[in-house]
């Protein structure tokens, strides 16, 4: 982070100097008192179970020089122990954090700003863009789990003075969240990876999800760019069009980025060609999954808009490594485990099953946890996944959770007794090491709330 002063923070958020010095130098912003560093400003945010105002003294103990708080009594208590520290009072610390991030973003004159959202693949696409742009530019990106209304401002406030490209990931649970984040970063390049079924329970329909995702475009200028994949049934060129440039990537000739010659090398990755800007360019991905060709093409397109050449993009893709719990293949005792436990939705489940079927091994096994936030059609989507796995050739289907029983019922039509359901994860943990054998390839996946990574850990013990 660039050095800023307490006075600048007060001006940005409309706060009040409660104690300390307007000239206090701040070199970082955090909201977790446990990870504060010397020179940090601690934002005391409200939480479901705790109040950040209770941890002002703890933040000061760790080295924070400044705090933004909402509770004067608790601020005074912290000052009794640390009277030399600076405290700023505001009425709404979450809004203040966003206001500070918006101001701080405005202090950069020439930084290139790319924002990514989507139902699936946004983290992977963001990481690919970062890997590609890093070949040519000093590039920063949204860290893991910082893509929401709190994490995004913290990401912005971590940008260094010499940053040339910033790649932001925008997640959401409700309408207006992406709009709020887009107003902070004001992207010049926006990417929507797809519109699936995640959050359909809250947003009502896939059309509602599309509306929420398109909030990323509301601050695009006419010279700015939106990039989408071709072939979506909801996310189409017609629905995505606006007062900005629209580019798409896909196999059809009408796309600005035309995908061809896709070759699936199983767990060794993918190769493909991408035709754009009058050139025909070959690329290699060292991660599995045909869906990653779409992610990569979107990433290449975004990077090309800001001046990355095809040869630079090819080098960057080779440096890409998926984030933890996203299509990580690990092994122990002759068993391969595909750890894709970060989250799940029906399209992502099917894509992961495709990866499993293209990975070498004797027996193909899935251990799948419930998919959340699917609303009234949850049973239908779980049944689809069960049928898809059985039709694809999975030899053992293990479902975990209340809704996965529907997937198991569907899979049992083909797999019979090789479709097994467990109500709880604890039941699986008791038996999974006896069920999984040497030579098996096992896909483990489920929604974040299922925490299926513990099953991966148990198998690999």
Image (cartoon, helix red, strand yellow):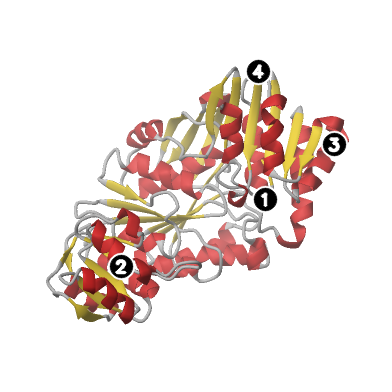
Instruction: Give whichever of 350, 264 is nearer the camera.
Output: 350
Secondary element type, mark 1: loop
Q: Residues within 10 Å of mark 3 (few under 14, many from 20)?
A: some
Secondary element type, mark 3: helix
Give the distance between the C-alpha atoms of the residues marked 3 and 2, in whole angstroms.
55 Å
Which numbered tag is attached to residue 56?
2
Percent of width and height locating residue 377: 76, 58
Reading the image, the residue beneath label 4 is: 439
Instruction: Give whichever of 19, 160 is nearer the camera.
Output: 19
Counting residues from the N terminus, which is met first, the one under dot 1 or under dot 2? Answer: 2
Q: Residues within 10 Å of mark 2 (few under 14, many from 20)?
A: many
Give the distance between the C-alpha atoms of the residues marked 1 and 2, in whole angstroms.
38 Å
Secondary element type, mark 4: loop
Reading the image, the residue beneath label 3 is: 412
Counting residues from the N terminus, which is met first, the one under dot 3 or under dot 4? Answer: 3
Secondary element type, mark 2: helix
The residue located at (43%, 71%) in the rendering is 46
Is any atom of residue 316 visible in this view? yes
Discs 3, 2 touching: Cβ within 8 Å: no
On screen, residue 342 above or below 416: below
Reading the image, the residue beneath label 1 is: 371
Percent of width and height locating residue 391: 78, 33
């Amino acid at each position: 982070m660039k050095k800023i002063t307490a006075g600048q923070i007060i001006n940005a958020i409309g706060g009040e100097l409660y104690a300390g010095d307007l000239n206090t130098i701040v070199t970082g912003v955090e909201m977790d008192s446990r990870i504060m560093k010397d020179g940090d400003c601690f934002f005391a945010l409200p939480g479901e179970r705790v109040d950040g105002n209770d941890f002002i003294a703890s933040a000061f103990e760790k080295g924070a020089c400044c705090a933004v708080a909402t509770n004067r009594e608790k601020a005074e208590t912290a000052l009794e122990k640390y009277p030399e520290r600076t405290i700023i009072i505001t009425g709404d610390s979450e809004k203040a954090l966003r206001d500070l991030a918006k101001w701080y973003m405005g202090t950069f004159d020439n930084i290139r700003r790319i924002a990514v959202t989507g139902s699936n693949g946004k983290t992977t696409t963001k990481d690919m863009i970062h890997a590609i742009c890093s070949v040519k530019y000093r590039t920063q990106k949204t860290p893991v789990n910082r893509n929401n209304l709190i994490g995004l401002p913290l990401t912005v406030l971590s940008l260094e003075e010499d940053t040339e490209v910033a790649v932001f990931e925008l997640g959401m649970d409700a309408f207006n969240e992406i709009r709020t984040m887009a107003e902070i970063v004001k992207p010049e390049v926006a990417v929507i990876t797809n519109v699936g079924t995640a959050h359909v329970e809250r947003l009502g329909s896939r059309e509602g999800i599309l509306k929420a995702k398109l909030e990323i475009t509301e601050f695009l200028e006419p010279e700015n760019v939106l990039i989408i994949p071709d072939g979506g049934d909801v996310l189409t060129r017609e629905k995505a069009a606006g007062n900005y440039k629209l580019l798409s990537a896909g196999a059809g000739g009408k796309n600005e980025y035309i995908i061809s010659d896709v070759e699936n090398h199983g767990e060794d990755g993918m190769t493909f060609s991408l035709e754009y800007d009058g050139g025909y360019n070959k690329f290699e991905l060292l991660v599995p999954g045909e869906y990653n060709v779409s992610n990569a093409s979107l990433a290449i397109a975004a990077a090309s808009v800001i001046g990355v050449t095809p040869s630079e993009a090819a080098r960057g893709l080779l440096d890409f490594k998926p984030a933890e719990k996203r299509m990580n293949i690990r092994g122990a005792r002759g068993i391969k485990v595909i750890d894709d436990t970060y989250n799940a939705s029906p399209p992502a489940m099917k894509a992961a099953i495709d990866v499993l079927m293209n990975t070498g091994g004797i027996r193909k096994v899935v251990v799948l946890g419930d998919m959340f936030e699917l609303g009234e059609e949850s049973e239908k989507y779980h049944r689809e996944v069960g049928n898809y796995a059985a039709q694809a050739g999975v030899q053992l289907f293990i479902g975990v959770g209340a809704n996965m029983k529907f997937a198991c019922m569907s899979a049992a039509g083909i797999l019979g007794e090789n479709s097994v359901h467990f109500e709880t994860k604890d039941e699986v943990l008791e038996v999974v090491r006896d069920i999984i054998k040497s030579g098996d390839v096992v896909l483990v996946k489920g929604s974040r709330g299922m925490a299926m990574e513990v099953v991966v850990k148990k198998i690999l013990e």
